[in-house]
Structure formats: C-alpha cells, structure tokens
Image (spheres, grey):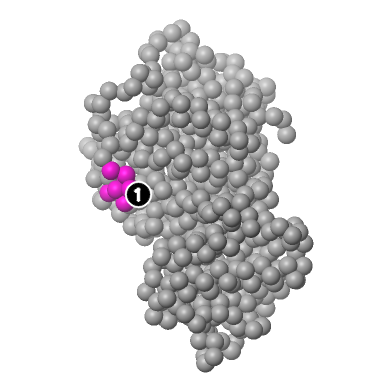
Amino acid sequence: MHSVLQVRWLGRVGFREALDLQRRLWAHSADNYLLLLEHHHVFTAGPSADEANLLVDPGEVGADCVRIDRGGDFTYHGPGQLVGYPILTLPGRRGGGLAETAAYVCDLEQVLIDALSDLGLGGCGRLRGYPGVWTDLDDTPRKLAAIGVRLSRGRTMHGFALNVETDLSWFERIIPCGIRDFRPTSLRAEGCAATMREVADAVVRRAAQRWSDTGCERADVAWRQRPSDLSAFSWGSGSGHRSESLSPDARRRPAPAHPDAATSDASGRVEVALPRSRARLAQAGVGGGMTLSERKPPWLRARMDLNDGYLRLRRVMRQHDLVTVCEEAGCPNIFECWGSGTATFMLNGERCTRACGFCLVDTRQPAPLDPGEPCRVADAVAEMELDHAVVTAVARDDLPDGGAAAFAETIAAIRARSPGTTVEVLVPDFGGDASSLQTVLDAGPDILNHNIETVARLQRAVRPSAGYARSLVLLARSAAAGHVTKSGIIVGMGEDDAEVDLALADLAAVGVSIVTIGQYLRPTSHHIPVARWVPPESFERWREVGAGLDIDHVESSPLTRSSYHAAESAAAVPPA
C-alpha cells in the first residue's frame, strides 16, 4: 500500500502534452498520481511495433502518430475513451523486469475489472496471452481496454485506455495491438450506459483501494465545454482552438468573435459576457458573489502615493512609448513598485486575444507588432539601471508563434544593453505549442513565469481559452529544461483553501520554484464577481504549505501579484 493518491481529471489533452507531463511527474515528483483524461485522435506505438499494423496515413484522417517508450503495438486514443496514467512508486519493485511489470499489469487490469463490475458490466476479465480487459470471454472475446506500461526504477508510466463511448471505426485504421483475431468494443456497444464521469469515478474508487492506504486527493477540471464557452478572438471550435477539449495540433489562425462569448462596444473593445461567465461559474459550483459596491476589508486598501520614483518611472515609460501590465491590469501595487524602480513591461501591444473573466487587459482585435518594441524596452531597462527586469505580453493567438519571438528578441536586447540585469519573463501558454516555448527558453531567461491562475475546477469558468493541464505542461517543460520556473494563483474566485493546496502540490510536482498567491479584485462589473475576501492568515498558511512542498519561495499576501517583489523572490532561489 502507498500514501495518498493524487487524482486529476484533466479533460481533453493532446497526447504529446500528456506525455511530457507524465515524464516530469515520473522524474521529479515522489508523489503517486493518477492522471485521467481523454485524447484527441492519435495512434501510438511501442518501439517494437510492426509498421504493417498501421493501415492509413494518420495525417490524412486527422490523427497524430507517436512512438513511445512502452510495450505494445499500435493502438488508438481518442474522444470517448477514458485514458488513465498511473505514475506510482511501487515498493519492492525497484527493477523493471518482466516479472515486476507483469505483476503491475495484473494490478491495473484488476482495477478496471472491479470498476466495470461496479458499473454493472459483469463477466469482464483477462484473456490468456493478451493483456488488457475483455468481455464475453467464453464465446466471442472482445477487448474493452488496452494496457501498455513502462516500469523503471520502481516507478510507473503510461497505463490504460478504456473504451467508454469511443467511435470504434477508428480501430479499423490499425491492427489494434497487432491482434487480428479479436475486435475491440466499448461500454456503450456492450449496453452499459454509464457516463464518462461515472466510469472515471468507479475507476478512482478502485484505484484508491489498490494503490493507497489513505485514500485519494482529487481535483477535476470541468466535465463539459461548449464552443460558446470559448473567448472572443481565440480559436473557435471551427478553426482549431487549442483548448483542453480541442486538438493541440491544429494549425493556429485567428477566428471571429463568437456572439455568445463576448460583445463589442463602438470602439471594438470586447467585454466578457457576464451571463455566460456566471453560467460557467454555476456549473463549477460557484454561485452569488459580491457586488462592486461592497466595501473591501482594510487589508485590501492600497494607498495612492504619487512619489518621486513613481513619477520618474512613468516619464520613462511615456518617453519610450512602452506598455506595462501594471497599468493595463490595474495593479494595486503600482505606486510601491514604481516608486522602488520596478515595473513589468508588456510586449506585443496592449490588446489580448483572450478574454479571461478576471483580467482588465484590453481585448480588442490586436494591432500589428511594433518591431522596435524590444529595443525600447532594453533602453528603458538601461536608463532605469534595473538589476532585475520583468517582461510579459498579451496572448497573441493570431500569430504563428503566439508572440514568442518578441520575448526572445527582448531578452537579447536587454542582455546587450544591460548584461548584469537578470531577466524574468511572464509568458502566455502559446496555445500549448512546444516550439514557441522553446524559442523563449533558447533565449535564456533567468526565470520563466507562467500563471496557472486558479484551481482545476475553475479553469473553464475563469480562463475558458486556456487549461489547467496545458499550463502544467508548460511549467513542466520549462523546469525539465533546467530553468527556474515560476507560477501564480489568484484566490477569491470561488475556490476553497484545500483546492489551493492541491494546486500548490501540482506546481511543486512539476518543479516550480516560485509561486505567487494574491486576492482577486474585480476590475469592472463586466468581470466575474469576487466570491470571498481571503483573510491574511490564509496567505500566511500557504507560505508554510509551499515550504512543506519544497517550493523555494511562496510570495503570498492579499495584494501580491505576479511580479510583486520579483527580485526578492528570484534571490530566494538557491543557485543550481
């Protein structure tokens, strides 16, 4: 038996993204995880797979094809299939020999067999010589679940794929697992009407019984996403939107605003449609909220201070025609930070292609890029004699690289003008595109920051064009590449303290070194309401939780924002 099992339902995730997340959890975390998700259409194969068992060109049928480090021949993953990736440390199985692997496969099969029995689908079991879970064993055996695993140094990767309501015609494009004599089936084809969520719940119960002596801690993203939930100017469902429920491999291109997702005023500014946001919040279990007129508690009242440092920095920004997130997002710490000579420069214009429910940044159709912006930022950094510079950007889903090149150019320009200045970048998710992230990492920032923003349950309600899994993957990729990695959480949008604890655990598990946590302050009546004022003692407690998770620094206070005390946070991370 093992310690608590961390269970995450992640929605629909690209296969390559999920693979990178698995690898990071396998290599970096000591915790036991069970990742549950669906994939986009993909064919996968182990190293010894027979190419003759792939009967089509994957690209011609809209699927990806990935070779991976697990046993087995070609198989298929796609919508309607529950995929589970247990990442477990198995006591007494330090090797990865055939006997240890066979014993683990047997455990995994039994979890599924017991879960299916709980759902009323009896008669499922093993077919001698054929790993997986089968039905109708004595007559015409049909395969319900494929299993392919890797066990190395006593820790597992990969897992199972259980056909719930899968389109079985996809299996006609391969010889599944190299088996010609039997055909696959699904729960729905066998007359079981259980929903994906009910099947996941049954699997979780049995997995927790088998792999934990203290139960599980579970966090789920929303269980449904409709095209109308997506934000204006993001990729709509008809144009390859990279969300947790649409393909991450689709080509990036701009999409028109969806009429149900946002409305535009005469200037073209997009406002989040509050009724739609409220509907998403209600689906996530959040109701009510505070009005804008409700008085803030005393610990949230920032003092206006037009000090000399603030006025000087404002002149520098205007002189160089630069945009800062401090102004665009209405940061309450602007007087303190600018007064001490620190600011967060914002690249790629001032208009964002996302419409997150908490954010004040302008969401009109973006303007063309300004090629002189990176050099002007570098000039301002040099003029201000900054020891630590923070650079962020709006999301630019309309650009092929999501705006990554501007980060790389700005890092290079700052290095050329101010070689002693450390550079922190706060990046968007680049639509999950690994090459765009690599462009930034190759430029060598000292800190790579990407905000996960909120807990798993509220992702769809708060940032419908992003995703919990995608953000974790980006952070995992950065940390795995050896970069100091940072993230941030906003509280007071409907989460509870325990969910924040789980988000901190996930950030620690992928190798995040710095975390910021601050109170949500509603910018306008068009944004989601504040659900609660989080007391100062909760922020103090999260600093302790983070320390217990071996996160190097947690900057946590009611008025903390992503770049608050950025230089001090960077200094708190021990050298590699």
Question: Can residue 93 be seen here?
Answer: yes
Q: Is residue 13 magenta?
A: no
Residue in front for this viewpoint, 493 or 241: 493
Residue in front for this viewpoint, 440 or 18: 18
Judged from this view, the residue extending furthest toward the top is 308
| Residue 331 percent location from the top left of the image | 41, 25
Residue range corresponding to the magenta coloring: 279-287
Quadrant containing the N terminus is bottom right
Quadrant containing the C terminus is top right
Find residue 127 and report its image quarter.
bottom right
* Residue holding disc 1: 284
Residue occupying image coordinates x 40% and y 41%? 495
Question: Can residue 40 be seen here?
Answer: no
Residue occupying image coordinates x 43% and y 20%? 333
How many neighbours does mark 1 have within 10 angstroms: few (below 14), some (14-19), or many (20 or more)? Answer: many
Instruction: Kindly identify the amino acid type of the residue bearing the numbered disc 1.
Output: Ala
Q: Is residue 24 left or right of residue 207?
A: right
